Each structure stands twice: as C-alpha cells, then as structure tokens.
Image: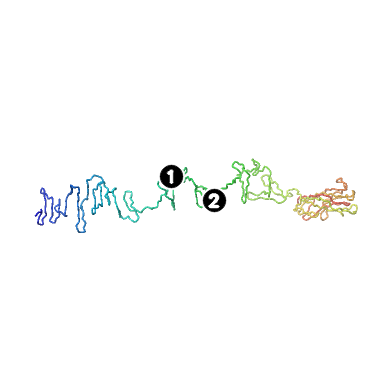
C-alpha cells in the first residue's frame, strides 16, 4: 500500500502520448529517455536544475566503499556553462569540505586556492610542473610561442658593466680572456672618460695609465708606423741641432764626438764653406786655419793618408791630385842642416912663431850656441862635424880673430875648413891684419866650400895667425845639397 509500482520483477514504466518517458528497472535504475538505464539515474538528453531559492545544488555523494564518485561523459565533451554576466561572480567552483579550492569567475579568471583570482590563472600556493625538463635551481622560461619549460637559471651575478640608467651600483671588473671588448659607433659615437661631452673618439679628462712592460720613468708614448703606441725613451730636451732651420746659430755649438764619426756627405757637387757663402772646393776656408796635430794627405775615403816624416815639406802634385810629403833634397832643394855660433872670447895664444909659419898655432872654432842641428845629416862634437848621411854639403863660415894683445898690426891671418885626414875643403886668401874690415888689430873673414862626405867623415873650421891672437865671435851654417 501507499506506493506506485510493481510487486514483481517487472520494470515500472511511465508514458505520455503513448511514448515511454520514464523507466524504473526492476533492479532500481531510473532511466529518462532510455529504456535500459545503466545507473541509478540514466538520462538520455539534457538536464536542467532550477531552484526558486537560487541554491541550485547537484550533490554526488559516494558510498562507504573506497570507490570515488565520478561525473562521466562517454562521448563528446563535458561542458559547464553559466549565463552569469561577465564580471567577478563565480560561475564554477570545486570545493572540499565546503572549502572552495577551484574557482572560475565570469570574467574567465581561474583561481586555485583563492576565490578571487585576478589573473587568468591565479594560484595561491605552490605549482608543480613536471614535463621532464625540471631540475634543481631551474627557472620556468618561455619560448617565442609562450611555451614554458624549466631552464638553467641565469647567473645571479650582475654581469652588466653599468645599469640601464648609465650608473654603476658597484665596482666592475671585465675579464676578457681570449675575447675582445669592442666599442662600436655609428659614425659619430665618442667615448668619454671623466667627461660627459667627449669631443674625440676617446676623450679622457684625467690621467691615463698604460702598463705594457715598456713603461719607465721619463719615457714618452710613441707610435709606430701602424699606430701602435708604446713607451720609449724621451728625446733629449737639449737642442742637439748644430744650426737652426734657417741656417743660423742661436749660440756657440760644441760637438763632442767621443768614439763616433761626424760625416758631411755631399751628392756630387756639395761644398762646405768656412768664412764664405760661395765655396769653390769641397772644403773652402776663407781665413786662417790651425792644426794641433798631424796633417794627413792622400789616401781615400776609407784610408787616412800619409802624415809624412819629420823635416819633409808638402809639395803640390798638380791639378786634381793630392799633394805629397817630400824631402827637400829629393826635390832639388837645399836643406840647412846646421847653424851655430861662437859668441864668447876664447883664451889668448902667445909665443914666438917662425916667420910665415901658421900651422903650429892654428885654433879650431868651437860653436857654443847651436841654433839648428838636424842629426839625420850632421852631428857636432867638440869642434868636429860628423856626416850622418852621404851626400854633397855646402859649408859657409864667418870667422873673426883679434891680435890687439901685442898691439901688433903686422901679422898675417887666415881661416880654413879641413877634414880629419888633414885635407883642406876651403882655404881663404892670406889677409893682413885690418885689411878686410878696416879695423886695426882685428881680422874678419868669410870662408865657404863644397865637399862630398860619406857617412862618418869629419871636418872642422880652423883659424890662425903669425902672431899671438884670440878667437872672436863667428858663425857657421851647413846646407845639404843632395846625393
């Protein structure tokens, strides 16, 4: 009693217009639009749940078994729709123990762990994405299409040289290694250090330090042919030019050569003038010249030439030829090799002499004041002259004797040059006292002779008188004529 249905194992069917609308199977399944319901409620068609109170709730409550209740769509898609206007009202939510865990707002924002999502996906809590790219310390990174994956995190060290506003937050060190650091500009770009208004490609307002191993105190930065700069010794601040660019001298100049050479090279016709602006020869000296060392002639641009030997003279060899040192006698000249004087009175000779006898009281002239002596030709020793070079000699002697001791004017005097073997080179005419000079008691004579002497031969000058006499001052000069 009090039920509508069957009492046997027959389905209960409800029809309208002779069409089955509802079936309750004998097993208890309810079917709407289906004759074989397979679940407690099996609806073939749409379902509309409406509540006048606005609390439209569809409860799915599981049993006591561990099987979870399910909302299953066999074919097609499960679509949940709401006619709620676009806004922040919730149109779909999933709750646990009446706590809303997933919320979908009318504006399309989805919240997980929040009922007020402010973005398309707003998660209040942790998110796990395990797509195979995950790993410790990785970060979720988007590709160009917005597809995210886990990628290694960028270095936490700020590698930018400067901030986007052009400032530095801290010191920066750029380690290049084998790489280059290039500052590229589009035509007019300039780099300023210490200035915000660079006027050159690199404008440094302050000091610059370049330490490439060539640096040192006092060095200067010098460019090579390729523009590569290095530190080089500074040029001397002392003006080392001999003359100014206009050819003048600002002050005296001293060139200290040391072990170096100072060369004046000319291209064929260059000439050097001293005291003249119009030099006629390679070196033209218009004025005097002083030499304090040897004068070399001859030679070539690679040899020093010849300084000659003592006593030689410089003789011309004609145009376009170097002069040469020559010995006078070899050139047809006579060479004075000895000049001496007797300038003090000698002892007086007194005694009885045979009439006309001269040899027994002859006196050799002794020259105490030797003005010139060339030992190459002549040596003088205690009245004797010794030939050191074979040749023809010219001898000139001036003698003077005094016989005034006895107040005798009747004696006869003469002078002569003799060799060591007794032969005479020259013998003057016999002279009476006083006749040559007109002086009483004094005889002045000039004797000369030419003789050929071998090396080692000797000669001397002799004076004598028939009366007692003494020698007065005289002189002699000897000329070497040649061989």
What x and y, as percent, mark residue 15?
Answer: 11, 50
**Residue 455 or residue 366, whichever sits in front:** 366
As drawn, the residue found furthest toward the left would be: 1
As drawn, the residue found furthest toward the bottom would be: 65
Quadrant where the N terminus sits is: bottom left
**Residue 392 or residue 256, whichever sits in front:** 256
Q: Which residue is mark 2?
A: 217
Q: Secondary structure at mark 1?
A: loop
Q: Secondary structure at mark 2?
A: loop
**Residue 126 or residue 248, whichever sits in front:** 126
Q: Nearer the viewer, mark 2 or mark 1?
A: 2
Indicate the quadrant where residue 454 lies.
bottom right
Q: Residues within 10 Å of mark 2 (few under 14, many from 20)?
A: few
What number is the disc on residue 185? 1
What x and y, as percent, mark residue 31?
Answer: 15, 52
Q: Earlier in the sequence, mark 2 or mark 1?
A: 1
What x and y, as percent, mark residue 222?
Answer: 52, 48
What x and y, as percent, mark residue 29?
Answer: 15, 55
Left or right of 18 on screen, residue 433: right
User: Marks 2 and 1, Cα distance to the nearest angstrom?
Assistant: 35 Å
Query: Colour scheme of this structure image?
Result: rainbow
């Amino acid at each position: 009693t009090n039920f509508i249905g069957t009492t046997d194992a027959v389905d209960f069917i409800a029809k309208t217009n002779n069409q089955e609308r509802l079936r309750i199977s004998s097993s208890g399944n309810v079917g709407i639009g289906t004759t074989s319901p397979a679940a407690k409620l099996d609806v073939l068609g749409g379902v509309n749940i409406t509540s006048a109170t606005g609390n439209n709730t569809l409860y799915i409550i599981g049993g006591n078994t561990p099987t979870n209740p399910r909302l299953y769509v066999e074919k097609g898609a499960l679509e949940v729709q709401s006619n709620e206007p676009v806004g922040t009202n919730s149109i779909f939510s999933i709750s646990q123990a009446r706590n809303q865990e997933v919320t979908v707002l009318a504006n399309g924002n989805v919240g997980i762990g929040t009922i007020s999502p402010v973005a398309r996906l707003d998660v209040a809590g942790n998110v796990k994405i395990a797509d195979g790219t995950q790993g410790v310390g990785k970060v979720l990174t988007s590709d160009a299409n917005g597809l995210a994956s886990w990628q290694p995190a960028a270095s936490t060290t700020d590698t930018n040289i400067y901030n986007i506003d052009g400032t530095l937050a801290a010191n920066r060190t750029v380690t290049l290694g084998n790489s280059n650091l290039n500052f590229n500009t589009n035509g007019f770009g300039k780099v300023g250090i210490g200035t915000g208004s660079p006027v050159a490609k690199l404008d440094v307002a302050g000091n610059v330090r370049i330490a490439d191993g060539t640096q040192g105190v006092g060095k200067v930065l010098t460019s090579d042919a390729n523009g590569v700069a290095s530190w080089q010794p500074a040029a001397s601040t002392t003006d080392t030019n001999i003359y100014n660019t206009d050819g003048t001298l600002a002050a005296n100049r001293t060139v200290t050569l040391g072990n170096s050479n100072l060369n004046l090279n000319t291209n064929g016709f260059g000439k050097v003038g001293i005291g003249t602006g119009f030099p006629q020869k390679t070196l033209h000296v218009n004025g005097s010249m002083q030499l304090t060392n040897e004068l070399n002639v001859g030679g070539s641009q690679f040899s020093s030439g010849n300084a000659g030997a003592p006593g030689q003279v410089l003789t011309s060899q004609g145009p376009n030829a170097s002069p040469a040192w020559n010995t006078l006698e070899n050139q047809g000249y006579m060479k004075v090799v000895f000049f001496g004087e007797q300038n003090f009175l000698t002892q007086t000779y007194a005694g009885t002499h045979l009439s006309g006898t001269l040899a027994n009281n002859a006196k050799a002239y002794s020259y105490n004041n030797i003005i010139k002596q060339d030992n190459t030709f002549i040596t003088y020793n205690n009245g004797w002259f010794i030939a050191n070079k074979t040749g023809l000699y010219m001898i000139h002697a001036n003698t003077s004797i005094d016989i005034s001791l006895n107040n005798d004017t009747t004696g006869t005097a003469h002078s002569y040059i003799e060799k060591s073997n007794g032969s005479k080179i020259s013998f003057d005419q016999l002279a009476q006292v006083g006749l040559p000079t007109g002086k009483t008691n004094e005889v002045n004579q000039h004797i000369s002779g030419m003789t050929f002497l071998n090396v080692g031969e000797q000669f001397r000058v002799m004076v004598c008188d028939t009366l007692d006499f003494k020698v007065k001052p005289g002189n002699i000069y000897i000329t070497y004529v040649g061989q």
